[in-house]
Amino acid sequence: MKKIICFLLLLLVISGVYAKSHSFSVVTDLAYYPRSESKINVNNTHFSFINGPFSALEARVTGNYFYTIPTPFGTNPLVKDNNLKLNAAFELSPVSVMPIFQANFTPIAFLVFTAGGKIGTGWDFAPLNVQGSAIYNDTTKKFTSTNPFQTWMMQFWFDSLFQFDIGAIVPGDWTHVVMLASYKVFYQRLTSAPDGEIWKWQGTADYCNGWKYYSSFLLGYQMPLLLQTVALQCELEGYLGGGNFATRYENWNPAFMEIALSPVAILKFNKMHQLTIQARFKSRRSYTEAIAENESAYNKTFASREWCFNRIAFSYEVKF
């Protein structure tokens, strides 16, 4: 504990000496999910087409405060603009509230290391029948909502990012081909959920207490236009070692790795306003048996990987 206090005091001293800037932003996210039913008893990778106009709607607003501390590593182009950026955020959605804190350290121009954490609580949103926080009951085969401000979702993570812009070695307005690759390891827990049991957060299920991984790869092209960036992103996510799911969920395949492919477009109106549009195609489990409406799939047997059009998302950022 003394070491932690000393580190925090040292960080405050450094920030007082090297503080470069404060900034704020507000990000509004909205996502629309069409309906697509899983194909049954298909034993190879396949695609499931949209068969309904609506499955879910997701929305949230996040306020961010950034505090940037330049790192005194010299004037070499690889290190002269590097920094430590502290980010305190507050996320609010119709079913949850959550404060977030993270620190981004850039020791060299093409590497960023991040550590952070968040803790939130959720409630039900009756108009759309969405459960903000709930635990699966294997007896009733349904999710039971938890009590807000008595049950908490916690997540802590470590992330490394490699970034490269060809424009850094070939100067010009039309030479900015950007490449990003990241790997994140994080631990998440719902405080009232027993280990091994499945729970739901912000209307999304299939969670369990334990360690997960997330990796993202992006190839993009930046232009001096209103349409500033076009890109293709690939995301991978799953539980390390299959996670800590109870053995009765083994046939459901807890070790399944979700894969998402997303074309991305970024419209930059000016230095303050930016809109990101993402269409996502995602893989999911399909099963050997049919799933009735409002029925969970955790007692079903995994058959194969199934692709579908998952969502279209909009993210509008205003910087101050």
Image (spheres, helix red, strand yellow):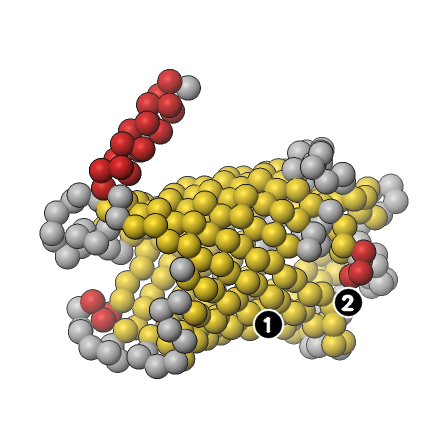
Residue annotated with mark 1: 312
Residue drawn at point x = 37 percent, y = 44 percent: 86
Quarter of the figure that contains the C terminus? bottom left
| Residue ranking furthest to the right | 140
Figure quadrant of residue 212 = top right
Q: Is residue 220 above or below residue 126?
A: below
Amino acid type at image mark 1:
Ile
x then y, percent, for residue 42: 72, 68
Tell me: 172 left or right of 273. Answer: left
x then y, percent, for residue 158: 43, 42
Q: Between tags 2 and 1, which lies in front?
A: 1
Task: State the residue in front, 62 or 41.
Answer: 62
Circle number at residue 68 = none
* Tally of marks: 2
Figure quadrant of residue 147 = top right
Residue drawn at point x = 57 percent, y = 57 percent: 61
Residue annotated with mark 2: 40
Contact flag, marks 2 and 1 (Cβ < 8 Å): no
